[in-house]
Image (cartoon, rainbow, N blue to C red):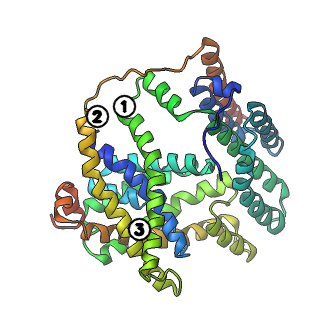
Amino acid sequence: MTPRLLALIPLAVGINLALGQLAAATALPLFLDTVGTVLVACLTGLVPAVITGAVSQVVMTVVSGNATWLAFLPVQLAIAAYAALAARYGMFGSTTRAALAGLGLGLAAATLSWPISYLAFGGVTAGGVTVVTTVLTGMGVPLKWAVYAASLSNDLLDKTVTFLLVRAVLAGLPRRAAARFPPVERALGRT
Amino acid sequence: MNVGYVAGRGPLHRSHPFTPLTLAATFAILAFVLPAPGGAAALCALALALALFEGVGGVLKSALLTVLPFWIFLFVIHAVIRGSPVTALDVASRITAIVIVFLTVLASVQPARLVDAMVDRGLPFSVAYLFAATLQAVPRLRQRAKDILDAQRCRGLAVRGSPWRRARALVPLAMPLILGALAEVDERSLALEARGAAYVVRRTPLHPPADAGREKMLRWGMLLLAVGSIVVKIAV
């Protein structure tokens, strides 16, 4: 692993874990815990993004002490792979493309995370999502669909905002910094 | 909530770092495999006893804070709405057992000893560095996020109001954090390059943790128990 990646990945994981704090301050139903992973996918490609996703999930579990988060490791890895693919096809080239790709990621993340939540933890995970699950179950929606709908409502918003934020970062990256990461040009659809 | 290593002299503290990790993995597997609801409840009691025997009873408070929302929501969803209190008890016990053991292991394994043990087994320096650097970067970036929030609020940024207004406030909060972190990459990569981090060589830990033969056997025993319980679960 190059020194640049060794320097970048811990900072990207730090971004994953710190941005939630800022989202909480705005009281928006967002986690923003994959911004660093998506950013690394755009800056360097698939493998470093997968490493960032894996390290993020492990460190998030260790820092919070909530061992249940480790079960969602496959979701982080899938997000890294999807983001690398989106970057490869220049999906960060415009706000509309980024928003559409973010919606796609939201759909994929919810589809991957709800079976884990439903089968392993009885449909109970993070606070906000579980409140929606509880309300839907109370309204008579079968539990598995309630869990999926709750995950979907949260992930569609969260991942769209994540992609839009990364698009804003890439577009605003100083030319000198962008030159250090050649895949950025492709992510922005310039090559 | 206090999570992390707590100095002590319990058996897990003295053991090779891989032993508590294997124990946590075995507990997690057994929690899903043992028959409900008695299996998970018994594991829960065992985890509780383990934390107290290890002398890290303080982790139980953190465990309670972590699992309490699970207990409440599981009770509401499964016991009240769906009329299945046994399911609520089973899933809640399973989560509680896993969380208690995980926190006990976190409190018993010193991160530096774990890194030494991993390097001793031939783990590349880059992997050990990644985890160590990340654990240092997280609190720093969290503090920076807090500083940015305070600074932007001082400049009049409103983080309350309509959802659209709050969403717009995210940009001036997130961008300085992300761009600031990216600006650090050059400086850090130069420092790493100067220390020869790019060269793949096997490092020698100064104080590798001792790994007794009986501990190795214990770890194999735990792994066999975990694998065996999965096989039995599938077969029955």
In this figure, which residue is indicated by the disc labeled 2?
B197
In this figure, which residue is indicated by the disc labeled 3?
A162
Indicate the chain on which mark 1 is placed: B
For the question of whether residue A160 can be seen, the reply is: no
Indicate the chain on which mark 2 is placed: B
The picture places residue B99, in percent across and down from the top left corner, at 68, 45
CA separation in Å, label 1 and label 2: 8 Å
Q: State which tag comes first along the sequence, 1 or 2.
A: 1
**Looking at numbered disc 1 in the image, what kind of residue is underneath it?**
Phe
CA separation in Å, label 3 and label 1: 32 Å
In this figure, which residue is indicated by the disc labeled 1?
B125
Q: In this view, does B100 lie above or below A139?
A: above
Q: Which residue is drawn at 68% across and 38% down?
A: B104
Q: Farthest residue in the top direction?
A: B213
Q: In this view, does B45 lie above or below A97?
A: above
For the question of whether residue A65 can be seen, the reply is: yes
**Discs 1, 2 touching: Cβ within 8 Å:** yes
Q: In which quarter of the image is the N terminus of chain A?
A: top left
